[in-house]
Amino acid sequence: MSTSEYRDRKKFEATNGDMVSLQFEVIPLPGAHSVKAIIDALQFVVYNIEISISEAVGDINIRENDDAKPGSPVAQLFLL
């Protein structure tokens, strides 16, 4: 499935005088084969962002959960 880029912009003044700008944009992601793959990748990044940040600043994160199943919620998170 091929998707091309698309952009729609609208600017107007609201009844109270505020300036409003609306933008809608579609950008195909290279290598993305499905919406599920994109959502899974975003969840992975969000789930692991605190570890990436702590590694960059030299801190240590310890994550513990009661369920060994992938995707299970974290029960405890320690920042040392």
Image: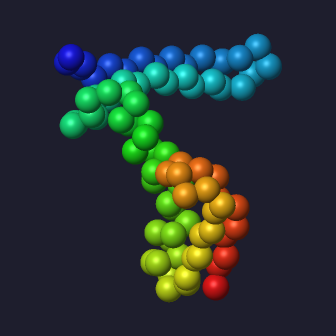
Q: Residue at x 53, y 52 (%)?
A: 69
Extreme residue in the right direction: 16
> Horizontal placement of 60 versus 45: left or right?
right
Q: Give percent across and percent down for residue 52.
A: 46, 69
Looking at the picture, tell me which residue is in the foreground, 10 or 24: 24
Give x and y (percent) for residue 63.
60, 70
Measuring 38% from the left and 36% from the top, which residue is drawn there?
A: 38
In the rendered image, the vertical position of residue 41 relative to residue 8, given as above or below: below
Asked which quadrant contains residue 62, the reply is: bottom right
Q: Position of residue 28 (x, y in %)?
A: 28, 29
Residue 61 location in percent, x, y? 57, 76
* Display coloring: rainbow
Instruction: Identify the residue at horizontal 32%, vertical 19% (top origin).
Output: 6
Horizontally, residue 15 falls left or right of residue 54, namely right
Whether residue 20 is situated above or below residue 80 in the rendered picture: above
Split into 4 quadrants, where in the image is the C terminus?
A: bottom right
Q: In the shown orientation, is residue 78 left or right of residue 7?
A: right
Quadrant where the N terminus lies? top left
Residue drawn at x 24%, y 19% is 3
* Residue 71 left/right relative to 1: right
Number of dots carrying numbers:
0
Q: Is residue 34 above or below residue 76?
A: above
